[in-house]
Amino acid sequence: MSGAARDPGAAPPLTLLYVPADRPDRVAKALGSAADVVLVDLEDAVAPSRKDGARRDAVRLLASADRPVQVRVNHRSTPWHDADVAALAGLPAGVGARVPKAESADGVRALADALPGRALHLLVESALGVERAFDLASASPAVASICLGEADLRSDLRVDGEEGLAWARARVVNAARAAGLPPPAMSAYTRVRDPEGLAASCRAGRALGFCGRTAIHPAQLDTIRAAFLPSPDEVERARTVLDRVAGAADAGTGVVVLADGTFLDAAMVERARAVLALAGRGDAPHAPVR
């Protein structure tokens, strides 16, 4: 896989839409949606008796995929994992693997070997996975992202409220950054008919360092996108930062200070570039994502 997945200047996807693989009509509709990435699910959304048929449908629908797609395979401890991986290996190289219940760096490397040249997107869904978040995120150059699967994590941690997930959320944000990966996307918001709650939750997640979110219904996409796109003020400040840095470089000045007295450093310049890259997502809903 190319190093593009770890490019800090690349804007991450804002909207990732889950769709069950055993509903080919919904998969086809999702592929035509405004989601930045379509997540075709062979795992939790598909009953055991329907796994084989769902896999066949996914292969048929994704054989000529020309937009960002990830396939969530079944865990390696299940009887469906090997067939899922074999099917994914025959799909276009741009179709990524969404890896559930990631806990083992060795397991990540083994999957990367089985799917050469294919991006791996890891889901951390257990206490052990959280503890090993950085080891997972840095296990292989094939790892393109890491995020939380909060439904299973809540069960494993035996917590109900948001407070019980605070450390795990901070941990995975930090692990992603330390490994040179994009900021994690937030886990799905399950109350589909609560756009106000979704927006508030997205704002809280953005403040923690998340960027983008998985969705379980197309109606959630616009709310998620609006919550994570930078505001006009943020875009203007980012442009000011880069303009001042460029002007200082032309003048041979070593220290750059904004009008409000803020000293600029390399991290702030990188952040400004990231803001402008993210702002471009508002005009490019199907920009290529690895």
Image (tube, rainbow, N blue to C red):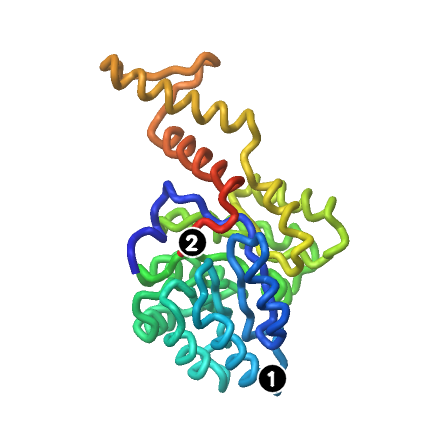
- Please indicate, yes or no, whether residue 230 appears anywhere in the rendered image: yes
Q: What element carries label 2?
A: loop
The number of callouts visible is 2
Viewer-side residue, 168 vs 189: 189
Q: Which residue carries the number 2 mark? A: 289
Residue 112's place in the image compared with 194, above or below, is below
Q: Which residue is drawn at 73% across and 56% down?
A: 191
> Where residue 185 appears, x then y in whole percent?
52, 52
Mark with earlier residue (2, 1) = 1
Nearer to us in this view, 186 or 262:
186
Q: Quadrant of residue 83?
A: bottom left
Q: Residue 184 carries which label?
A: none
In the rendered image, the quadrant that contains the N terminus is: bottom left
List x then y, in percent, for residue 35.
Answer: 56, 54
Left or right placement of residue 157 versus residue 99 in this view: right
Q: Nearer the viewer, residue 263 or 97?
A: 97
Question: Which image quadrant: the C terminus?
Answer: bottom left
Residue that appears at 56% across and 79% down: 54
Which residue reaches farthest right? Answer: 193
Q: Position of residue 225 (x, y in %)?
A: 59, 44
Q: What residue type is labelled 2?
A: Val
Up/down of 79 relative to 220, above or below: below
Residue 156 in view: no
Residue 26 appears left or right of 288: right
Disc 1 residue type (three-letter):
Arg
Q: Give above or below for 105 relative to 168.
A: below
Seen from the viewer's position, the closer of residues 260 and 88 is 88
Assess disc 2: are there few (<14), some (14-19) or many (≥20) residues with their C-alpha within 10 Å of its C-alpha: many
Which type of secondary structure does the marked residue at label 1 adopt? helix
Name which residue lies at 37% across and 48% down: 178
Q: Residues within 10 Å of mark 1 (few under 14, many from 20)?
A: few
Residue at numbered disc 1 = 50
